Image (cartoon, coloured by chain):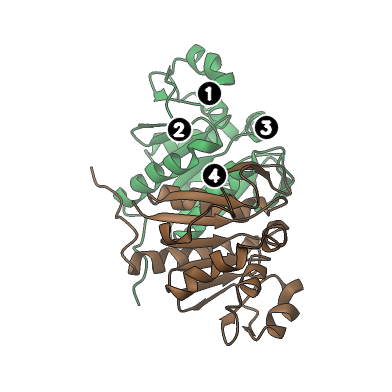
Chain colours: A green, B brown
Amino acid sequence: MPKALIITGEGFEDIELLYPYYRLLEAGFYVVIAAPEKGRVTGKHGYSVEAGASLDEVDPREFDALVLPGGRGPERARVHPRAGEVVRHFFEEDKPVAAICHGPQLLITARVVAGRRLTSYWGIRDDLEAAGAKWVDEPVVVDGNLVTARYPPDIPLWMREFMRILEKRGLLAPYPKD
Amino acid sequence: MPKALIITGEGFEDIELLYPYYRLLEAGFYVVIAAPEKGRVTGKHGYSVEAGASLDEVDPREFDALVLPGGRGPERARVHPRAGEVVRHFFEEDKPVAAICHGPQLLITARVVAGRRLTSYWGIRDDLEAAGAKWVDEPVVVDGNLVTARYPPDIPLWMREFMRILEKRGLLAPYPKD
């Protein structure tokens, strides 16, 4: 069974976490949410999810793909001393990564944005450019293993491209036929 | 391009509307949200969406599939005089219908539940049984064209079964390959 990791923290943008979480479950993935502390994590709109792993204990080598939702979660997560190295693993191993909105803040922390073509929420464009990214204002940007998007209305295109990469990597089972 | 209709009203359960909405867009559908009045409709958790059609004007014959999210939206929608007949069209024409949580309230209004095997949020079980349904406590129940589920954690299984039906009906395009 393919495994995906979601990294977040308190104040995540609910739909940016819940959509890929349910979408990957729908596609047959085992999905773990990691946050600075294990236990309930609550989004800006009041939905809560269970962080099954803390950033202290999570082992990124166990996972095939990474999702970085937005909201205030990425800023809460990035100050954890292991956040950068956990994210960086997926780039060192060329595993699929989807990031949206403020999620790319964790890419800066992981020092993986230099020379990368990507997008994000407009408010952190300057940070990404200062870190060396080629930032573009498009609903979805694919650069190798990385799929980025700007905000919730981009979600359908964002996940469509991410699912295509997972399919190309052999991580998507076809829907079982009757 | 296949077309899907979502019927709801103020106070919908945000994720039960947003997940199928984005999921169908991801799959290449044209999706219209209908509510008692045209314009912005807001969920319990504060997300808002644009109702592109009022229940007065929507023509169900234009659509290939129907989604009924839960929350308080279905009760707001069902009191509209056309709600029942709009929903009933999808059963008369055997088109795919997905309903979750309080969404099946609209199935009672449409008088289509007698003899049907289905589920819903536990709180409206008695109403569905009184209307003649065979109610079961399972995460997802498929009965012909109808796919029902109980609450948000059932969403991945609910939509997986709904997408399978859309695929069997030839409404799902395969992901374009590079």
Q: Is residue B40 above or below residue B132?
A: above
Quadrant for the C terminus of chain A in the image: bottom left
Q: Secondary structure at mark 1?
A: helix
**Disc 3 sits on a residue from what chain?**
A
Which one is in front in this view, the residue at disc 1 or the one at disc 3?
3
Residue A80 percent coordinates (x, y): 66, 32
Q: Secondary structure at mark 2?
A: strand
Badge 4 is on which residue?
A: B52
Q: Earlier in the sequence, mark 1 or mark 3?
A: 3
Q: Please tell me the numbered disc located at residue A148.
A: 2
Are the two marked residues, 2 and 1, in contact with CB atoms closer than 8 angstroms? no
Tell which of B169 and A154 is nearer to you. B169
Badge 1 is on which residue?
A: A108
Q: Amino acid at mark 3?
A: Arg
Residue B15 percent coordinates (x, y): 62, 52
Badge 3 is on which residue?
A: A72
For the image shown, how many numbered marks are present on the structure? 4
Question: Looking at the image, which residue is at 52% across and 37% down?
Answer: A153
Which one is in front in this view, the residue at disc 3 or the one at disc 4?
4
Q: Are marks 3 and 4 on the same chain?
A: no
| Spatial CA span between label 1 and label 3 | 15 Å
Q: Amino acid at mark 4?
A: Gly
**Disc 4 sits on a residue from what chain?**
B
Tell which of B47 and A38 is nearer to you. B47
* Classed neighbour count for the residue bearing mark 4: other residues with Cα under 10 Å, few (<14), some (14–19), many (≥20): some
**Disc 1 sits on a residue from what chain?**
A
Question: Looking at the image, which residue is at 39% across and 23% down?
Answer: A116
| Spatial CA span between label 3 and label 2 | 17 Å
Determine which quarter of the picture holds residue B127: bottom right
**Left or right of B27 in this view: A50:** right
